[in-house]
Amino acid sequence: MSTFTISHAGRTDAGRVRQSNEDHFLAEGDLIVVADGMGGHGRGQAASRAAVAALRQAFADDPTATGLVHAVRRADAAVVELAEGWSDHDPESDRPGSPPPGTTIAAVARIAGAEGDRLVVVNVGDTRVYRFSDGSLSQLSADHSLVADLVRAGEISTEAARVHPERHVLTAALGASRGAAPAVNHLYPSPGDRVLVCSDGLFCELPTEAVAAVLADGDPAEVAADRLVSAARANGGSDNITVVVADIG
Ligand code: MN
């Protein structure tokens, strides 16, 4: 029965424009999670942290593929609960049009199974999981976004989506759309593969080839993560940037 190890390094950075960092990540043992909160005025920060904490706890209780999917639903419930209580914390949220707390989430976990260990990937929103294998980068997560729908419909290219004016419009997020069904994927990785989990502050600033080039250099995960953040900042850093690089051994 095949097995593998995961060693990872994560970095998060507010970028060069935003005053606060609403992203949050966890890279702990066999579980990696990145969340990109939204709402401003502390809402996004609270949402991404609540979602990551709820997912971590739920997955610890049931570290299976089903458990990981369920953990996303627990994270959704945690953000909905946060939104319901938010007016207690922030009088500004009583203003009409003030957005409730919400967050994207993407998680990847090593899960034991009858046919060996595999990686299970779940996501809601546009935080991404990529696999870098044999020199090429492929996306394992499935974006819930307007531009992803346009790409799937064959109307625009992935590169056009990356710089599209409406690239930040989500079609699902935790907290904002109750019961949002997570996209689920899985794979049996090969030794030497790298897995990248990142917020849109990385992939909207950097073309896929630039991300792949950094991963291809074979630096340790810590160095690769630092280089990706630096490159996104150098290209504008207009959003919070979070990356976790994981090496499969
Ligand atoms: Mn973002």
Image (cartoon, rainbow, N blue to C red):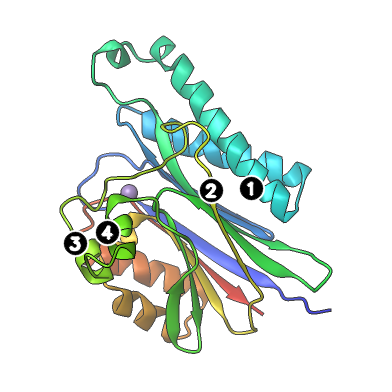
For the view shown, which residue lies furthest in the front direction?
153
Q: Of 248 and 80, which appears nearest the observer?
A: 80
Q: Where is residue 112 in the image (x, y as percent from the top left)?
A: 78, 64
Per the image, the residue denoted by label 4 is: 150
Q: Is residue 103 above or below residue 28?
A: above
Closer to the chain start, of discs 4 and 1, is 1
Q: Of 172 and 58, which appears nearest the observer?
A: 172
Closer to the chain start, of discs 2 and 4, is 4
Per the image, the residue denoted by label 1 is: 69
For numbered disc 2, what is the local secondary structure? loop
Closer to the chain start, of discs 1 and 2, is 1
For numbered disc 1, what is the local secondary structure? helix
Q: Residues within 10 Å of mark 1 (few under 14, many from 20)?
A: many
> Which quadrant is home to the N terminus?
bottom right
Q: Where is residue 169 in the image (x, y as percent from the top left)?
A: 27, 45
**What residue appears at the point 80 percent right and 73 percent down from the top-left corner?**
115
Q: Residues within 10 Å of mark 4 (few under 14, many from 20)?
A: some
**What residue appears at the point 32 percent right and 56 percent down from the top-left corner?**
149
- The CA distance from mark 3 to mark 2 is 25 Å
Per the image, the residue denoted by label 3 is: 163
Per the image, the residue denoted by label 2 is: 182
- The CA distance from mark 3 to mark 1 is 31 Å
Front of the two marks 3 and 4: 4
Queried on whether the Cβ of the residue with tag 2 lies below 8 angstroms from ligand 1, the answer reads: no
Q: How many marks on residues? A: 4
> Is 99 positioned to the left or the right of 182 in the image?
left
